[in-house]
Structure formats: structure tokens, C-alpha cells
Amino acid sequence: MALAIDKFGRLDVAYNNAGTLGEMGLSTSVSVAGFNNALAINLTSAFLGAKHQIPAMLEHGGASDHLYIDFVGYSFAFPDTASYVANKASLIGLTQALAAEYGAQGIRVNAVLPGAVDTPMYRDMNDTTESQTFVTNLHALKRVATPEELAPSVLYFASDDSSFVTGTASLVAGGASITRT
């Protein structure tokens, strides 16, 4: 926060995008330590980001805070991903709570819920042709996104074009929430 304010004089937009898959396995076999590690990275880090970002935004009359979530935990879950799914679903609640608490003060808080995105984490989880084909076919567009394809959605929430949007969990998921084939 100090670096952003020192360099730019204020904070107008924040984008919280930390994440880990966490310990994989059936929910009854996931260790408490593994679950808590995923919680710290996926949920607590977003909470702490907002905790420090919002006061800086309030100093200048408002701004836009974004949380990066995922379609997993919103529209469905994969087996063996309890830590990840629980944390991602909780981020939607955090988005709504922050939006309700700070909307009247000019702070807009929204979440972007992408489908599969071709990142190192995606490739780690989908390291076989079969897995990649399965995930690709979850999307109506029959492909995964590139990080660059998500940027316009994030920029929309950061811009004045979304001045009446807050508390929203916006699917940018290539139709993953509607596809069952």
C-alpha cells in the first residue's frame, strides 16, 4: 500500500488475485493444516488486501476493489478440491459484505469469476491431454481463456462504466456455468 500511494499519490483500484489449489484429495482426507494454508492464501489474503486497501481508497472519496474468484465454488465443484472450492465460495460472501459496508462511501467491490484460464496453475492441475480435454469441454466455447481475455472484464469494473455496479460476482467463464456436455 505504501509503495502504491508513494508512487501514485492515491489508490483508486485494487485487484486481489492470489490463489492456490491447496491440498488435493477427498475432503475427509485433507489435513487441517492443508485446508488452513489454502484459506490463508485464497481468502485471508483477499480480506487483508481489502482491509488495507479500502481505508486508502476512502481518503480520496471512493474507488473500486476487485476480488478474483473462479467459477468453481459458484456454479459447481470438482472432486478432491474441497479446500479450493470452499475458499472461492467464501470470497463471494466477502465481496458482498464489503460492497454492502462501503458502497455508501463510494467504494465498489466486485468479483470476477473466470472459467479455466491457461496459467501455470491450470497446467499443473491439468497435466494430461485427457484432463485438458475434460476441462475444455466444460465450457460452451470449448476452449480455455488466456489471461489477456480476462483483462477487459477487470478493466470494466475498474472504470466509470461500472459506476452503478457493486457486490457482483460476474461470470467470465466461457459458458462453463451453462454447459453440461
Image (cartoon, rainbow, N blue to C red):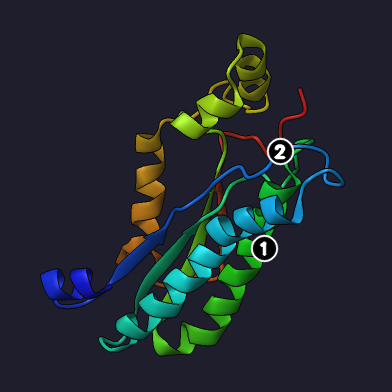
Q: Is 66 left or right of 38, judged from the image as shown?
A: left
* Residue at (45, 30) in percent of width and height: 120
Query: Which quadrant holds residue 26?
Result: top right
* Residue at (41, 49) in percent of width and height: 153
Q: Position of residue 4 (x, y in %)?
A: 21, 69
Callout 2, which amino acid? Met
Residue 38, compared with residue 136, is above or below; it is below
Q: Nearer the viewer, mark 1 or mark 2?
A: 2
As drawn, the label of residue 9 is none
Q: Position of residue 179 (x, y in %)?
A: 72, 30
Q: Pick the residue in front: 87 or 32.
A: 32
CB under 8 Å between discs 1 and 2: no
Q: Earlier in the sequence, mark 1 or mark 2?
A: 2
Asked if residue 124 shows in the view, the reply is: yes
Callout 1, which amino acid? Ser
Query: Which quadrant holds residue 128?
Result: top right
Split into 4 quadrants, where in the image is the N terminus?
Answer: bottom left
- Label 2 secondary element: loop
* Residue at (56, 69) in percent of width and height: 95
Q: Is 159 left or right of 25, judged from the image as shown?
A: left
Q: Where is residue 148 in the image (x, y as percent from the top left)?
A: 34, 36
Q: Pick the residue in front: 94 or 43.
A: 43
Q: How crowded is mark 1: few (under 14 residues within 10 Å), some or many (20 or more)?
A: some
Q: Where is residue 14 in the image (x, y as percent from the top left)?
A: 35, 65
Residue farthest toward the top in the current orientation of the protein: 129
Split into 4 quadrants, where in the image is the C terminus?
Answer: top right
Q: Residues within 10 Å of mark 2 (few under 14, many from 20)?
A: some
- Label 1 secondary element: helix
As drawn, the label of residue 24 is 2
Disc 1: which residue: 90
Residue 168, compared with residue 100, is above or below; it is above
Cα gap from disc 1 to disc 2, whole angstroms: 18 Å
